[in-house]
Amino acid sequence: MASNKSTLSVFPPTLYAGKVALVTGGGSGICLGIATALVRHGASVAIVGRTQSKLESAKATIEAATSTTNKVLCIAADVRSFEAINAAVSATAAKFGRLDFVVCGAAGNFLCAAEDLSPNAFKTVVDIDLVGTFNTCKAALPLLKLSKGAIINITATLQYKGTLLMAHACAAKAGVDALTRVLALEWGQYGIRVNAIAPGPIDDTTGMTKLMPSGARDLILSAIPLRRMGTVRDIEFTTLYLFSDAASLVTGAIEVVDGGEWLASPMA
Ligand code: HXC
């Protein structure tokens, strides 16, 4: 089956004209792809990450890919600090005048057996993935109330069965799933939709290179019912759908984008 590397989009190029998004973790990987897709479809985007130089490089990548200028704002901030992400939200509104969409994608992960994991190592990943997601959603709430905007949290599938050597990330992502559902319940009254995307194995990402043993790709691929690895484009398209009016009744959903991988995986 062909891989999904097409630059063609089924979505109109002006779909998000005049809209403003903030994407944490937007300096690389899946969230850089999401930020690029939003700009390609007309939005202005603030990308948030810890390292200014990485963000500047990501901005150049987005501008080159979309033939745009002045549509990307780089904001160095650590999502573990509410004050920092709150300031990032304010800076986004100051630059672009509003906020419609938030993608909470900042994440940390590494392989470590639970018995070898220090309390601080466990806390670090929970702080980035889960506390960081809460901080970002909470900071954005006042502006999302004004725009009746939408949130997408980037979660995972590894917590569904439990994944060896990832107690920290599984616990954090299970929390992200729960947080997504509760915020959908509580913030629906404001017209704010809160959903999550759970990517499976996505080629050319840190998750694959850092977490998958070398040589495991073929094994993973053979177990995926749709017989292809995910691409960043797959997550971009799901994001474009979930933020669009086509998904106006969708909230509290966790959209798994993995070709059926977790359902088929024999691994606990
Ligand atoms: C064990 C480790 C460790 C490792 C760090 N620690 N790396 N323990 N094995 N490989 C411990 C440290 O010893 C320390 O504990 C604590 O974690 C904090 O480490 P710091 O380096 O001080 O933290 P920080 O600089 O904030 O770095 C955070 C990080 C880092 C998560 C550890 O790797 C990071 O920021 N990565 C960001 C990029 C990333 O990993 N992306 C992958 C996302 S993939 P002590 O006790 O010594 O103080 C993903 C997809 C999942 O999320 C889905 C896969 C299919």
Image (tube, rainbow, N blue to C red):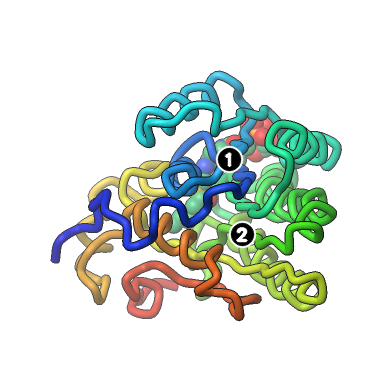
Whether residue 92 is situated above or below residue 188 in the rendered picture: above
Query: In the rendered picture of this protein, how many numbered marks are placed on residues?
Result: 2
Q: Position of residue 70 (x, y in %)?
A: 55, 27
Tell me the tag on residue 33.
Answer: none
Element assignment for label 2: strand
Report which residue position mark 2 lands on: 153
- Rate crowding at label 2 as few (under 14), some (14 to 19) or many (20 or more) other CA atoms within 10 Å: many
Residue 163, given in percent of the width and then of the height, sits at 49, 65
Q: Earlier in the sequence, mark 1 or mark 2?
A: 1
Q: Is mark 1 within 8 Å of ligand 1?
A: no
Answer whether labels 1 and 2 touch (C-beta < 8 Å).
no
Task: Name the quarter where the C terminus is drawn.
Answer: bottom left
Residue projecting furthest to the top: 53
Q: Is residue 5 above or below residue 257?
A: above
Q: Residue at x 61, y 28 (%)?
A: 74
Q: Amino acid at mark 2?
A: Asn
Does 38 appear above or below 176?
Answer: above
Q: Which element type, helix, strand or loop, lies under badge 1?
A: strand
* Nearer to me, 171 or 177: 177
Left or right, 178 with reference to 231: right
| Ligand 1 positioned in quadrant | top right
Q: Position of residue 179 (x, y in %)?
A: 73, 67
* Front one among 174 and 16: 16
